[in-house]
Each structure stands twice: as C-alpha cells, then as structure tokens.
Image (tube, helix red, strand yellow):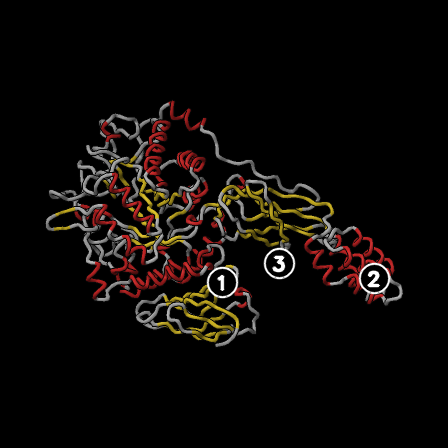
Amino acid sequence: MRDNSTEGSGAPSQAAEDYWRNLPSNNLTPPQTLTGRFTVLDVWPRVEGGRRPVKAAVGELVMVNCVAFREGHDRLGVDLIASDGHGRSVRSPMVPRDNGTDIWDGNFRPDHEGDWSFSIATYSDILATWRHRAEIKIPAGVDVELELEEGARILARAEVPDRTVLDKAIRGLRNTALTPAGRLAAGLDESLWKMLREHPIRDLESMCGPWPVYADRRRALFGSWYELFPRSEGSSLDPLRSGTFRDAAQRLPVIAEMGFDVVYLPPIHPVGTVNRKGPNNSLTPGPGDPGSPWAIGSADGGHDTVHPDLGTIDDFDAFVASTRELGMEVALDLALQVAPDHPWATSGRPWFTVRADGSIAYAENPPKKYQDIYPMWFDGDPAGLVAEVLRVIHYWMDHGVRIFRVDNPHTKPVRFWDHVLGEIKRTDPDVLFLAEAFTRPPMMRALAEVGFHQSYTYFTWRNEKWELEEYLRELSGPSSAFMRPNFFVNTPDILHSYLQYGGPAAFSIRATLGATMSPTWGVYSGYELFEHVAVRPGSEEYLDSEKYQYRPRDWDKAAAEGKTLAPYLTMLNKIRREHPALQQLRHIVFQQIDSDRMVAFSKRDGDDTIIVVVTLDPFGPREATLHLDMPSLGLDWHDRFVAQDLISGQSFSWSATNFVRLDPHLSCAHIMSIRPGVV
C-alpha cells in the first residue's frame, strides 16, 4: 500500500548473519546443454538458466522454442517432451520456422497442478533426409537405382502400426516393372508417411533438459479481483460508525453478479492508536476516526486478530463461507509492518530499527513520512521473525484464506520471501501470493522468481498506445516465464490523472484494456461509481481517501439513476469467462491500426480467436483503418470472416483491411469473436 522504506541504523546481529548465510537455497540444479550429438541453444522459456521453474497454470498453453541445427544438409528432427511429476510424458514434434533462423516451436498444456518439466530431443531424421534427396535426384535421373534401394532399406527399419502399408511401399520401391517416378510414388504413399510422422526413425537421439516448470492452479493465471473495505460497508460519517463483516457480506451477491472471482480485503486487524492518522492523512485525528488499516496492531491484538469494530473471528469465518458459496475466494492483505502499539513493538522484540535516541524508527520514504507505522527489521532476529510470519499466514489459512495480497514485499529481503513462500508451497501449494510491488524491474523479477504467483504492474501508468504495446510485449514475452501481471485499473493509492479528467468514458476504456489485455485484472471499490476526485491537483491520492476514513456509498441510488459502470463490468467479466483466448497471457498479437489514439490486438487459444479494438481518447469519436495480420488469426490473407461484436451483439463481414469508428460515449471498444464465412 505505502512504500515504507527506512534506512536501518543498527548493526546486524551475529545470529542474523549466520541465519542468512546458512539458509538453504531453493535453487534447482540447472540442466546441461550442448550434450549428445546435436546442438540446441537458446531454450525458452527458462528462468535463471533452469535454476527456478517456469510459471505455468493448469490448462495454460506453454509455448517452447529453441535454436537447433546440425552440420551439412542432412535433416534434423526435433521433439518436445513434456513430463509431469508422476513420470508421465507426452512427446510432440516441434516445427521449424520458415525463415532460415533454425528456430523450432512447440507447446504443451499442463493438465494438473504440480511439478512439470520439458526436454528437447534432437535426432538425425534419416527418413526426411532420404525423401528430400530422392525427390531431387530421381526426377533428374541421378543415382536412381541406388536411391530407390536405399529408400527401401530405410523404410524397412521403421516401426509402424500397419506393416501392410509399409511392406507395400518397400515392394513398390523395388518393383522394376514400374517407372522410376512410379516406384518413388509408391514409396511416398501418403497414408504411410502419415504414420511415419507419428513414428519416425530417430537416429543419434540427443536430449537437452529437463527444464523445470511448475503448474499452479488456474486462479494463479485467470481471475477478476474486487477490492473491498469491510469497514465502509454499512458505515456512517454522522455519527461515525464502522461497517462490519456482516454488513460487507450483504454486498457479496452483487460482486458475484458482476462476475468477480476474488474479493480482496485490506488489513482487517486492530488499528493502532499511537500517531493515528486522520482524514486525508492528517496528523490530527478526531474522536472516532478509524485511522489507516495498514497501521496494524493495538492493545486489542496484532496480525492474528480481527478489528473488534468489524466483528469476531466467527463473523470473518462466516464472511469467507458466504464468499465461497457464491463461487468466489477471499484474498487477505499481508502487511509486515506495525503500529507503535502493536504487541510486536511493545514486547521488546528485536524486529525494529532503533535510532540513536533509543526510539524506534517509523516508516519514511522521504519526503513522505508515515508516523503511524514501524517497518520491520530483518537483521536482528530473522529466525524468530520468519517463524512468526509463518504462524500468522497459517492462522489465516486455517480460517479459509488461500490467497494473500502482500503489501510492499520489495521493502523486505528477497531471501526472506524465498524461504517463507518456499515453506508454504511445500505444504500448501494451492495458496497464492500477489506482490504489491511498484518498484524497479529487477526487484519485481526477483520477487516473482522466488515464488510470488502474481504481481501488480505499471499498467495504471501506461495510457499511450506505444506504452501499452511495448509493455504488453514485455509481459507476454520475456517476462512471462517468471511473472504474471494483475492489471488493477485503480487502487486506494492510485487515481491516475486519466481517470481524474477523462470522465465516465475513461473508466470504460481502462476497464476494457485491463480485462482483455491481462488474464487477471482488478478494480477497487468505487470504480463503478466513477469516483475521480483527487485530494489536490497533481496528486494520485483520492479526496477523503478510504485509507483514512469510512466511505459509505449509496449503491442503490447510483443503480436507480443509471450512474454506475456495473453493467459494463459484468459484461466484461462474462466475455472473459466465455472466451479462453482472454484467459491467456502469452498469446497477444498487436494488430496495425493507423491511429495513435486507438489500439488493436488479438488473442487465440485453440479455436477461440478474439480481436479487440479500443479507443484511447475518452473525449470524442475516433476512426481508422485496421490492417489485420491474417496468419496470426489462423486465416489466409484473402479470407473473409464473420466478426461478432460481443459488446453490441452486431456481426460484420471483415477481411484483412477494415474501417473502424468508435465513439467512447457510445461504445469505447469492439471485442470481436471471429469465425470463417460471411454475414
């Protein structure tokens, strides 16, 4: 939520130095390369040279490529072998790109959770070598008898299900009563070669790998998140009164109807009273002001306690049960920081930075100051701190929480997360962690590699066409091996100027981009009401931020007056659930559209193909010509096809070139499902 960086002033303890030095590594042994007869280079995907597993999810198509070649002109065969942790393997041929690069492509789709790996097998493809040679030499009358006999001998080595077809082809190659062309045709019988492609002769087979992959449950890849402050539901500002878990539970059916899968709760723990913040982050709270939920802990308890104003742990359990009954999950905030009156801070534990005057350093990110929060110090008693954090996580797991949104993980040691997340994965691999890390790319990468299943991203700050295209190519390409994005369109911390000044159309545009570009996206409560007023010009903080006060909302009035985006969010989530192409990360292809205020892209998964065209201008109509890369859609350049707009329900007859006009006040986007044919 807030970047609680601080410079430690105390020397690390000897116990801490020993702890970090002796902490076991979760690195895997990297696979050997350049083994066997043939050369394989640049295997992708891989993470840290195979020392960490590639991220995958159940049902996700994992695309593999490599460079593979051999000396001379003989043909090379390349296969992809995908294996699960139970010893089951699936082998499929890889396909060379027809551009002279020696790059081969393959894919596999994990069908269950757990450890997977893939290997690349290369072999001398003597069948393809002979066929290529024979199809050139025999029509030219060169070495005819020799080539035909060699073909017969090579075929005799094959092992196919139907020997009848094989033996007939061998006899045909040796039948001197036929012309050379007829003999060759007999040896190239298509039904035989279909079998041979499935049962090739693999001479000098060489292996590269295995390269580790881990398949998480589907929710790690695909989901729609809704952020909700329970204390605002049913709350009042006059008089000041907190909402409860029971109040918040009444909101759950509406969230489920909008198609959201995950209900994310900011910290639900007691809020500190020392240096408590008032409305709009003021230092002078009034009586009854609730303070920031991220200032965790008071005399009422700490990270393993619910705020008494919200109810009891039984009320929380009932909230989780209600969420589950509606087909959703609860994600809980894990914020490793404390208020000055948190039990961890008042018990004298060596988990905080002590300054020269004996005081504990509060959180700072100069010039910002967070006087209501102490950050944790990981070099005093790391073993004790790790044990306590694991205890807290298991406590909430025991109460039905299987997803954690982790606050500011980039201000904690990467090795700490490597150990903690590794321990949870070892016993409960279905528990997921989302990193709220708006920080430098290397840190975001490291957090993803050591176990965070998803990450917040820079999406909220990518609003221009070139920014979106560049960023999505990175996320769906090189970064996809280790990091999964979660495209939140807003957060309690981030109200981008695009939303502040773009009007309702801006909210529709950003929701469309988030929901279709990323398989996981999220909204913070109030987005559907177009909340857009900042605390001051140039700030991304909301006026009367829910981080510091209750924010009651009149949902019924907004719906009655039609001043809500909820129906559009509902439609977006429905489209996402019905179309597997939008549930994938790695398949995005940007299409050419001749306007810098419109963006177009496509996604495919199996037979499902989606084309999305979105205007980026919230103020007025835009029109342009869309030039489609037809092969990327699985079509030939001359094909026409039916494009059904899943927003309006209209169908259009499209081809490689199409005129597009979008008025953001009517519809900001086309989300097109395509099929062959014409309207």
Q: In this view, does 349 lie to the left or right of 158?
A: left
Classify mark 3: residues with Cα within 10 Å, few (<14), some (14-19) or many (20+).
few
Which is more foreground, mark 1 or mark 3? 1
Q: Which residue type does callout 2 highlight?
A: Gly
Q: Earlier in the sequence, mark 3 or mark 2?
A: 3
Q: Distance of mark 1 from mark 3, alpha carbons?
A: 23 Å
Which residue carries the number 3 mark? 97
Tag 3 secondary structure: loop
Q: Considering the image in quadrants, where does the N terminus appear?
A: top left
Q: Name the residue under label 1.
A: 608
| Residue underneath mark 2 | 172
What amino acid type is highlighted by mark number 1?
A: Asp
Image-based side of 28 in relation to 341, left or right: right
Q: Does the rendering let one see residue 402?
A: yes
Position of 130 relative to 356 (above/below): below
**Nearest to the observer: residue 224 or residue 287:** 224
Residue 314 on image: x %, y %: 25, 39
Task: Give the number of the disc on residue 200.
Answer: none
Q: The residue tagged with tag 2: helix, strand or loop?
A: helix
Separation of marks 3 and 2 at Cα, in angstroms = 34 Å
Whole-percent x, y for residue 83 in the image? 58, 44
In the shown orientation, is residue 228 left or right of residue 43? left
Q: How far apart are the alpha carbons under marks 2 and 1?
A: 44 Å
| Quadrant housing residue 563 | bottom left
Q: In this view, does 410 lie above or below 58?
A: above
